[in-house]
Amino acid sequence: MKKLNAVGRIALGLVALAASMVLIFDLIFGLLPSESDTQRIVRQKVSENLAIQAAGLLQARDVSAIEATLHSVFRRDPEVRSIAVRRADGLMVASAGDHVRYWVAPRDGLSTLTHVIVPIQADGVRWGALEIAYRASLERPLLDWLNGPTVKLLGLLTLGGFVLFYLYMRRALQHLDPRSAVPERVRVAFDSLTEGVLIVDSAARIVLTNHAFRRLGGERSRDPIGRRPDDIPWLASALGADTGEPPWHEAMRTGKPVSARPIAIGANGSQSRKAIVNCAPVLDGGGGVQGCMITFNDVTQLEAAREQLVDALADLVTSKEELERKNEELEWLASRDPMTGCLNRRVFFERFELLFRTATRDGTALACVMCDIDKFKSINDRLGHQVGDQVIKAIGTLLQRAARPGDLVGRYGGEEFCLVVAGRDAAEAARFAESLRARFEAEGAASVPALFGSQVTASFGVSTLGGGARGPEELIDQADQALYASKHGGRNRVTVYASPDASLPMTKDEAHAA
């Protein structure tokens, strides 16, 4: 048998040292998990994830889906002998495999390597458990250890380490031999780099380049050995005339590295590229500068990706603003009556409920004003529904303009509107309703061309918390009773609801007197 050469013996010794260190550290610190530990962790994770999935399906009461999930796990995992979901009263809800045969409940209720039990909670109470019976692991410690990750790691470390150490030592020993350091081999090594490399001597003349550097300027067939970097046309153009001293001159003059200098190669052409220049001076043992190594990192694709990201972020901001605007429009449309722009009934009652609870809790005043257009049916009959719609829009606009921030204006019915005003007692609410009545009497027909020369009026009913209302609906009902009294009393007037014991609601004059 042929003996190993010196490089092979050194590589073998290094592998033996590395393997010994791994064994010693594992023996002392237990760095590598055993096969049983790995099995226990994997089985615990699988069981917990399956229990979570089963709990979700139980909440959805989908027993068939639970059964299908258990059978899927049973078929996929050859280590699983049986699996089941059991309620706390012992009833088995779903199972896969011969669970009655293989399941042995742990005595202390804790999971073992072969019998795993995971509780399933429902509403904070233990609903039942997931039970999984696994095949037994190797019972012979020696075989268990040989089949474990430690031995496998050592085997791979020995085989792979020997090859890598052998190749590395052979290359390193060759480079230690001056006779092996031929320029061609150095050039091949530099050509394998993805970054452009340029090495200059102390006179700033190029002594070595690689393919990546020459590709930057498109000079694939020409090697600029012996020239100065400043004399290469594409590089001089990339540096620019107004950038001052080239970075390699600065590095050689100061003896310190110069990094992250951006340049644009072929900026005026269609093949424009961007690169980052880094310069590191080459020093001798006494600190003298003997040359400079210059690297060119092509960041064209990175810059393009960055610009695309910036554009995408700008588009995202625009889309976000547009989405917010659309959401505001949708929210407005969902809460408003399409004809008048007043609150629709659903949103009106939601907000009215909040105002009512707040006023009741804090003991503050709250008033409800019902408004109805007088003789509206005759307007529709005489002039048509289109004119009637214009009148409804006109009173809706008037009411919204008169309302304060925080007041509610809702379209209650066809020609009927409801207002909720906070902080106003019966007298103040009556004066507010009277101002609305007067404004509509004066301005209601002005915005409807078909009613030119005629007059449109409205009747109002007012109720407050002083009337004993126990909820928004009752407060609206009291205002509606007052509105009916205004209609019955001649229309175009304001009536204030007095109290449940009063025979008739108060008129506007009685509210002022009160």
Image (spheres, rainbow, N blue to C red):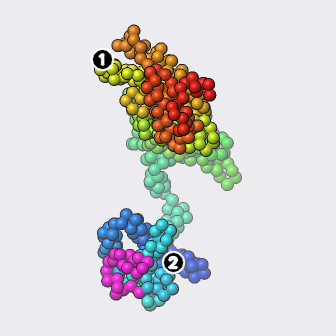
Q: Which residue is mark 1?
A: 382
Categorize mark 1 by other alpha carbons within 10 Å: few (<14), some (14-19), many (20+).
Answer: few
Q: Quadrant location of the N terminus?
A: bottom left
Q: Residue drawn 40% across and 65% down?
A: 59
**Of 273 and 287, the residue lying toward us:** 273
Amino acid type, callout 1: Arg
Q: Give the x, y percent position of residue 492.
A: 46, 20
Which image quarter: residue 178?
bottom right
**Of 456 and 323, the residue lying toward us:** 456
Residue 147, compared with residue 204, is above or below; it is below
Q: Give the x, y percent position of residue 12.
A: 50, 78
- Label disc, if present, on residue 33 of the rendered structure: 2
Q: Give the x, y percent position of residue 101.
A: 34, 87
Q: Give the x, y percent position of residue 267.
A: 46, 32
Amino acid type, callout 2: Pro
Q: Confirm whether residue 318 shows in the render.
A: no
Residue reaching furthest front? 503
- Residue 86: within the magenta? yes
Q: Secondary structure at mark 1?
A: helix
- N-terminal of the two: label 2 or label 1? 2
Residue 221, compared with residue 152, is above or below; it is above
Q: Which residues are magenta?
A: 83-104
Residue reaching furthest top? 453
Q: Confirm whether residue 188 shows in the render.
A: yes
Residue reaching furthest bottom? 140
Q: Residue drawn 52% across and 31% down?
A: 505
Q: How many marks?
A: 2
Q: Is residue 455 left or right of residue 249?
A: left
- Label disc, if present, on residue 105 of the rendered structure: none
